[in-house]
C-alpha cells in the first residue's frame, strides 16, 4: 500500500529523474493493485448476484409454475384415479392425484364428486369430508347423496370440487327429500299389498249376500266397510303419508272396484 512517507520530499533533495521515476512507479503499482482489487470485488459481486438469481429461480420458479398450473385447472379443484363404486352412506378414502393442484387443494366440509367424462356432467355425488392429508392426498369422506347414474358401476376418473356454504343447505335438503321419497315408496308398496290382499279375499270368498245385498250384487268400494280408511290408516301409521299422497293408489283401488262381479254362496 502506498504511504505518504514514500512520496515525502525532503529539504535539499535533488529533483532528478530518479526522484520522479521512483514516485511514479509507486503510484502506478498502487493504482494497479486497486484495479486488481476492484476486479475481485466485481467478480464477487457478479457471483453473488448469480447465486441470488439461482436461488430465486429454484424457490419461486416451481411455485410460480405450480400456481400457473393450478390456475389453469381451477382453484379448489383436484382429480383422483382411485377406483370407487359409490353408494349412499359409504365411508371410504380416495387419493388425490399428485399434481400441482394437490398442495393448493383445501376441501370444504362438503365437496362435490363428479367425473371427467363430458357426458357425465349431470351425474355427481355429495360427500361430507372427514379428513384430508395433504402430504399423501388421502381424502376420507362419507357419501351423503348421489344424483344420476354415478353409483351404478365403478369409476376412476373423479373430479373433486370444493363446495360453497349455500351448497351445504341444498345437499342437506336433497338428502331429506330422498329419504321422504323412500318412505313414500314404502308406503305405496304397503298399500298396494293391502289392496292385493283385499282383492284376493273378494275373489276367493263365495258369498250369497254382501253387506246386506242379495241376488245379483254389484259392489262398489263403499259397500266394503272401512276398506279405504283401513288401507289409508295402514299407510299413515307406518309412514306418515295420507292415502291421497301415494302415487296411483286411488286409481288402483278404483280399478279393483270394476273387477268385482257376482258372488254366490256363503256369507260375508
Image (spheres, grey):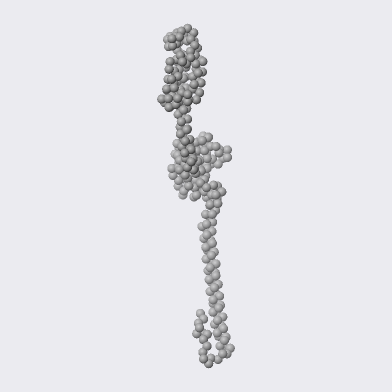
> Image quarter for residue 20?
bottom right
Residue 153 shows up from this direction: no
Q: Position of residue 69 (x, y in %)?
A: 55, 50
Q: Position of residue 87 (x, y in %)?
A: 47, 35
Q: Quadrant of the C terminus?
A: top left
Q: Is residue 259 above or below residue 37?
A: above
Q: How many marks?
A: 0
Residue at (54, 69) in percent of width and height: 43
* View extreme (left): residue: 237
Q: Nearer the viewer, residue 124 or 171?
A: 171
Q: Nearer the viewer, residue 108 or 167?
A: 167
Residue at (54, 77) in percent of width and height: 33
Q: Is residue 49 above or below residue 175?
A: below
Q: Is residue 77 above or below residue 180?
A: below
Q: Position of residue 68 (x, y in %)?
A: 55, 51
Q: Position of residue 37 (x, y in %)?
A: 53, 74
Residue 199 shows up from this direction: yes
Residue at (53, 65) in percent of width and height: 49
* View extreme (top): residue: 215
* View extreme (bottom): residue: 12
> Image quarter for residue 210?
top left
Residue at (51, 15) in percent of width and height: 258
Amino acid at each position: 500500500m502506498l504511504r505518504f512517507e514514500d512520496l515525502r520530499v525532503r529539504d535539499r533533495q535533488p529533483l532528478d529523474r530518479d526522484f520522479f521515476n521512483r514516485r511514479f512507479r509507486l503510484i502506478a503499482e498502487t493504482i494497479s493493485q486497486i484495479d486488481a482489487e476492484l476486479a475481485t470485488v466485481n467478480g464477487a459481486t457478479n457471483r453473488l448476484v448469480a447465486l441470488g438469481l439461482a436461488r430465486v429461480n429454484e424457490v419461486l420458479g416451481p411455485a410460480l409454475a405450480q400456481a400457473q398450473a393450478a390456475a389453469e385447472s381451477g382453484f379448489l379443484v383436484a382429480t383422483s384415479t382411485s377406483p370407487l363404486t359409490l353408494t349412499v352412506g359409504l365411508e371410504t378414502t380416495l387419493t388425490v392425484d399428485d399434481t400441482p393442484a394437490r398442495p393448493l387443494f383445501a376441501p370444504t366440509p362438503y365437496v362435490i364428486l363428479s367425473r371427467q367424462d363430458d357426458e357425465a356432467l349431470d351425474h355427481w355425488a355429495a360427500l361430507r369430508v372427514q379428513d384430508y392429508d395433504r402430504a399423501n392426498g388421502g381424502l376420507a369422506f362419507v357419501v351423503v347423496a348421489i344424483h344420476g347414474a354415478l353409483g351404478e358401476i365403478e369409476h376412476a376418473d373423479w373430479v373433486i370440487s370444493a363446495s360453497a356454504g349455500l351448497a351445504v343447505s341444498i345437499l342437506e335438503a336433497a338428502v331429506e327429500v330422498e329419504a321422504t321419497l323412500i318412505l313414500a315408496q314404502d308406503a305405496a308398496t304397503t298399500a298396494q299389498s293391502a289392496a292385493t290382499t283385499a282383492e284376493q279375499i273378494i275373489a276367493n270368498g263365495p258369498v250369497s249376500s254382501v253387506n246386506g245385498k242379495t241376488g245379483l250384487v254389484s259392489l262398489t268400494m263403499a259397500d266394503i266397510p272401512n276398506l279405504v280408511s283401513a288401507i289409508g290408516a295402514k299407510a299413515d301409521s307406518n309412514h306418515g303419508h295420507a292415502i291421497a299422497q301415494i302415487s296411483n293408489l286411488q286409481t288402483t283401488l278404483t280399478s279393483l272396484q270394476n273387477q268385482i262381479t257376482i258372488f254366490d254362496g256363503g256369507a260375508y
